[in-house]
Image: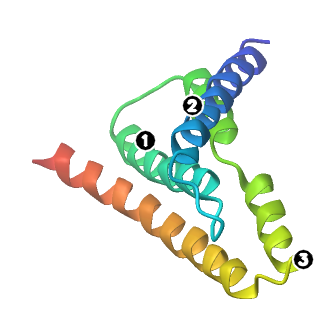
Amino acid sequence: MEKILAIALGGSLGAVGRYLVQLVASDYHTEALPLGTLLANLLGCLLIGVFWSLFDRIQISNEFRLFLFTGFLGGFTTFSTYARETIQLFKTGEHIQAFTYLILSNFLGLSMVAVGFMLTHKFLRG
């Protein structure tokens, strides 16, 4: 039961965090790209890289790992929203924007995980 509660609490906090990112991004929204979703996913990727590297070095409980990775970051990132927005761009004939969004989300998302991991690894080593 503790594991389920850890995931539920983390997920609710992550979802609120994603909503706050959406609110901030709405001030800069363009019709070309769903900026809020992109930013939440990229920030989530960076954070998962940082925490992954950090928790390779220090011991944390399984419940906290579930809270953070499955709950918070799972609630914060928005793959299903990203997929729907990509399909919507294709459906409305905005193929260049759809492919741009796909490439940016995937390439930058993977890059952010790597950057977060490497920066944390370097910072903790020094």
Element type at mark 3:
helix
Q: Is residue 10 above or below residue 69?
A: above
Q: What amino acid is found at the position of numbered circle 3 in the picture?
A: Lys
Rendered residue at 52%/45% (across/down) = 27
In-image side of 120 versus 22 (left or right): left
Q: Between residues 121 and 61, which one lies in front from this camera angle?
A: 121
Element type at mark 2:
helix
Q: Which mark is residue 68?
A: 2
Q: Which mark is residue 51?
A: 1
Q: Residues within 10 Å of mark 3 (few under 14, many from 20)?
A: few
Q: Position of residue 86 (x, y in %)?
A: 77, 70
Element type at mark 1:
helix
Q: Which mark is residue 99?
A: none
Give the Cα distance between marks 1 and 2. Answer: 9 Å
Q: Position of residue 126 (x, y in %)?
A: 9, 48
Q: Which residue has dot 3 on it? A: 91
Q: Is residue 5 above or below residue 117?
A: above
Q: Residue furthest right?
A: 91
Q: Earlier in the sequence, mark 2 or mark 3?
A: 2
Q: Are marks 1 and 2 in contact (CB under 8 Å)?
A: yes
Q: What amino acid is found at the position of numbered circle 2 in the picture?
A: Leu
In-image side of 16 versus 59 (left or right): right
Q: Between residues 64 and 19, which one lies in front from this camera angle?
A: 19
Query: In the rendered image, which quarter is residue 32 located in?
Result: bottom right
Q: Position of residue 45 (x, y in %)?
A: 51, 54
